[in-house]
């Protein structure tokens, strides 16, 4: 999964499109400023920003943390996520010695998990991105974040049936909404 980052050329193209919309399409300067501000805000939320936002939400960026449910590290990995990304460590080993899973390895594992979830959800991302389902605006980053919280299978259940599980603190839809404006692909 690569990063989606607008190059300078795309910003120039975006500027000219908005300029012509103002000149010939009846958009006022005030409306232009609002559209430009929202567009730039969305375009600048990169994969790195997404990763950092998830780490902050999950652990307040504390890489050695183990929560009371046994989830570990920056991204609060459970044993099933650790296994899914092919790591040969256990939660028990991490509790005893967090250095078996240092921050760089945690970030690499998160990226692998993002890729796994993206493959599982690809059909649904293509079909529903940009639409509102069960009251939530659907985006790639929102679905990937929700899959990190509750698993890709539960994201599919949400799309199909409106199933909205919680980990006791946070609902799947909280992640769909909170992380919807990141450019990842």
Image: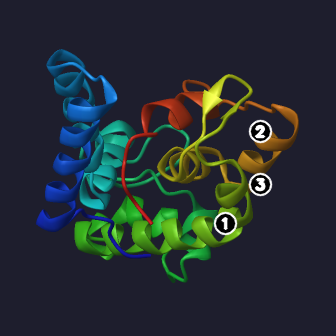
The residue where tag 2 is placed is: 158
Give the SS element for disc 1: helix
In this view, the residue in front, 11 or 26, is 26
Mark 2 or mark 3: which is in front? 2
The residue sitting at 35% across, 37% down in the picture is 57
- Residue 163, given in percent of the width and then of the height, sits at 81, 33
| Name of the residue lying farthest toward the front | 24
| Name of the residue lying farthest toward the right | 161
- Residue 176, given in percent of the width and then of the height, sits at 55, 37
Classify residue 23 as left or right of residue 148.
left
The residue sitting at 19% across, 31% down in the picture is 37
Asked whether residue 90 is in view, the answer is: no
**Residue 59 position (above or below residue 35):** below
Q: Residue 88 carries which label?
A: none
The residue sitting at 23% across, 62% down in the picture is 6
The residue where tag 1 is placed is: 122
The residue where tag 3 is placed is: 153
Classify residue 165 as left or right of residue 93.
right
Q: In which quarter of the image is residue 93?
A: bottom left
Q: In which quarter of the image is residue 46?
A: bottom left
Q: Badge 3 local density, few (<14 within 10 Å), some, or many (20+)?
A: few
Q: Quadrant of the N terminus?
A: bottom left
The residue sitting at 59% across, 72% down in the picture is 116
**Residue 155 position (above or below residue 126):** above
Disc 3 and disc 1: Cα gap in Å?
Answer: 12 Å
In this view, the residue in front, 109 or 158, is 158
Give the SS element for disc 3: helix
Q: Mark 3 vs mark 1: which is more N-terminal?
A: 1
Classify residue 99 as left or right of residue 157.
left
Disc 2 and disc 3: Cα gap in Å?
Answer: 9 Å
């Amino acid at each position: 999964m690569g990063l989606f980052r607008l190059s300078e050329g795309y910003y120039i193209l975006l500027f000219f499109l908005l300029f012509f919309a103002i000149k010939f399409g009846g958009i006022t300067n005030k409306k232009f400023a609002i559209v430009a501000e929202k567009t730039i805000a969305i375009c600048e939320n990169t994969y790195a920003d997404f990763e950092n936002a998830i780490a902050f939400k999950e652990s307040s960026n504390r890489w050695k943390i183990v929560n009371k449910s046994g989830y570990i590290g920056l991204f609060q990995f459970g044993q099933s996520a650790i296994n899914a990304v092919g790591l040969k460590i256990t939660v028990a080993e991490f509790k005893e010695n967090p250095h078996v899973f240092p921050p760089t390895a945690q970030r690499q594992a998160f990226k692998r998990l993002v890729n796994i979830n993206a493959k599982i959800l690809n059909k649904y991302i293509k079909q529903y991105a940009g639409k509102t389902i069960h009251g939530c605006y659907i985006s790639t980053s929102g679905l990937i974040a929700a899959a990190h919280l509750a698993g890709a299978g539960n994201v599919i259940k949400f799309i199909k049936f409106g199933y909205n599980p919680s980990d006791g603190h946070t609902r799947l839809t909280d992640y769909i909404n909170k992380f919807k404006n990141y450019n990842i692909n």
